C-alpha cells in the first residue's frame, strides 16, 4: 500500500493522514528523548509497547465515559484516532512528589501529596514548556475558562480511574501528562483526551519495591528501559504475543 501522507513528525510519534476525513494515524516510534531533546536514543520495541498500552488505557477510559480520540488499532505500531485541534497545554496530574516538582520546591521524591495536584505547562518546545497558571491560559486565550474547567475535571477523573487500575497490578501512579483537543462535530465542540498515555509520559513505580517502570529509567541512565515498559504491559495483561513478527504487521498492512 502506498505510504500515507505524513502530517507531522514529533519526537515519539509520526502523524499520518487518516483513511477518512477527520482522522489521523499515530505511528509510534522507538525514539526516545529527554530534556526537550537534549538527550536522545532508541529503545527497541518501545513503539509497539506504547501503542498497545495507550490503546488499552484509552479504551478503558472510554468505557468509563471519558471521551478520547481513539478509534481503533491498525497494527502493532499504528492506531487510528480522531483528528483534533490540540489545546497547547501539557496537563500534569501528580499524586506523589517527583521530577520537576521535587526540584522546584525542594521536596523529597516519593512523598505523597496531601491532595492531587493539577499543573499546566504551555506546550512550546522553544520555550521549554514553561509552567503556567490558569491566568496565563485565560489571558493568552489558550483555552476558555469553561474549557479549562472541563479539562481539569476530565484530568481528575482520568487520575481516579488510572490510580485504581494501576494499584490493582501493583503499580503506583506517581504522575502523568495529558493532552486534550477540540473535536468539532458540526457546530458542536467537545473536549477529548488526545495524544497518548504510556510509560513515556507517566511515572509508574512498583508499589512494593518503588522501582521505576517508566521513562525516568532512560532520563537517568538506569538501563532496563524496554524491560520496564514490557513489565507494565505484562501486568496490564496486554503483552503482544510472542513471535508475531511486528515487521509483517507494520509493513504489510
Ligand atoms: N488526535 C490528534 N489529532 C491531532 N494531533 C494530535 C492528536 N493526538 C496527538 N497529536 C499531536 O501529535 C503529535 C505527536 O507527536 P509526538 O508525541 O512525537 O510529539 P512531540 O515530539 O512530543 O512534540 P510536541 O508534542 O511538542 O508537538 C503531538 O504534537 C501531539 O500533540
Ligand atoms: Mg509527545
Image (spheres, grey):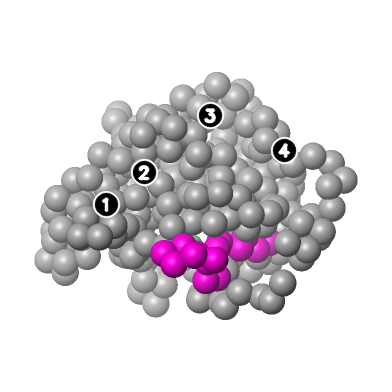
CA gap, disc 1 to disc 3? 28 Å
Residue 41 on the magenta segment: no
Q: Which residue is mark 1?
A: 190
Mark 1 and mark 2 residues within 8 Å of each other at the beta carbon: yes
Q: Earlier in the sequence, mark 1 or mark 3?
A: 3
Q: Which residue is mark 2?
A: 67
Mark 3 and mark 2 residues within 8 Å of each other at the beta carbon: no
For the residue pair 226 and 158, the one nearer the viewer reads as 158
Q: Earlier in the sequence, mark 1 or mark 2?
A: 2
Task: Point out which mark residue 239 bears.
Answer: 4
Mark 3 and mark 4 residues within 8 Å of each other at the beta carbon: no
Q: Which residues fall within the magenta stretch?
A: 16-30
Q: Earlier in the sequence, mark 4 or mark 1?
A: 1
Of tags 2 and 4, which is closer to the observer? Answer: 2
Task: Point out which mark residue 166 bears.
Answer: 3
CA gap, disc 3 to disc 2? 20 Å
Residue 27 on the magenta segment: yes
Amino acid at each position: 500500500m502506498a505510504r500515507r501522507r505524513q502530517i507531522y513528525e514529533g519526537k515519539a510519534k509520526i502523524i499520518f493522514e487518516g483513511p477518512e476525513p477527520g482522522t489521523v494515524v499515530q505511528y509510534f516510534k522507538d525514539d526516545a528523548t529527554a530534556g526537550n531533546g537534549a538527550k536522545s536514543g532508541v529503545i527497541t520495541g518501545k513503539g509497539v509497547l506504547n501503542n498497545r498500552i495507550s490503546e488499552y488505557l484509552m479504551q478503558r477510559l472510554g468505557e468509563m465515559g471519558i471521551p478520547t480520540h481513539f478509534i481503533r488499532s491498525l497494527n502493532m505500531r499504528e492506531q487510528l484516532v480522531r483528528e483534533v485541534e490540540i489545546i497547547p497545554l501539557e496537563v500534569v496530574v501528580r499524586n506523589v512528589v517527583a521530577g520537576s516538582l521535587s526540584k522546584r520546591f525542594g521536596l523529597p521524591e516519593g512523598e505523597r501529596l496531601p491532595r492531587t495536584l493539577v499543573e499546566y505547562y504551555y506546550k512550546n518546545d522553544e520555550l521549554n514548556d514553561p509552567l503556567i497558571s490558569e491566568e496565563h491560559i485565560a489571558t493568552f486565550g489558550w483555552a476558555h475558562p469553561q474549557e479549562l474547567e472541563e479539562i481539569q475535571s476530565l484530568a481528575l477523573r482520568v487520575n481516579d480511574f488510572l490510580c485504581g487500575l494501576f494499584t490493582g497490578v501493583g503499580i503506583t501512579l506517581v504522575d502523568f501528562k495529558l493532552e486534550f483537543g477540540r473535536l468539532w462535530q458540526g457546530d458542536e465542540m467537545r473536549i477529548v483526551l488526545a495524544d497518548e498515555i504510556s510509560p513515556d509520559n507517566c511515572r509508574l513505580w512498583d508499589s512494593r519495591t518503588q522501582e521505576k517502570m517508566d521513562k525516568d529509567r532512560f532520563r537517568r541512565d538506569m538501563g532496563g528501559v524496554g524491560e520496564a515498559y514490557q513489565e507494565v504491559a505484562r501486568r496490564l495483561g496486554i503483552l503482544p504475543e510472542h513471535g508475531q513478527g511486528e515487521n509483517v504487521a507494520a509493513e504489510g498492512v
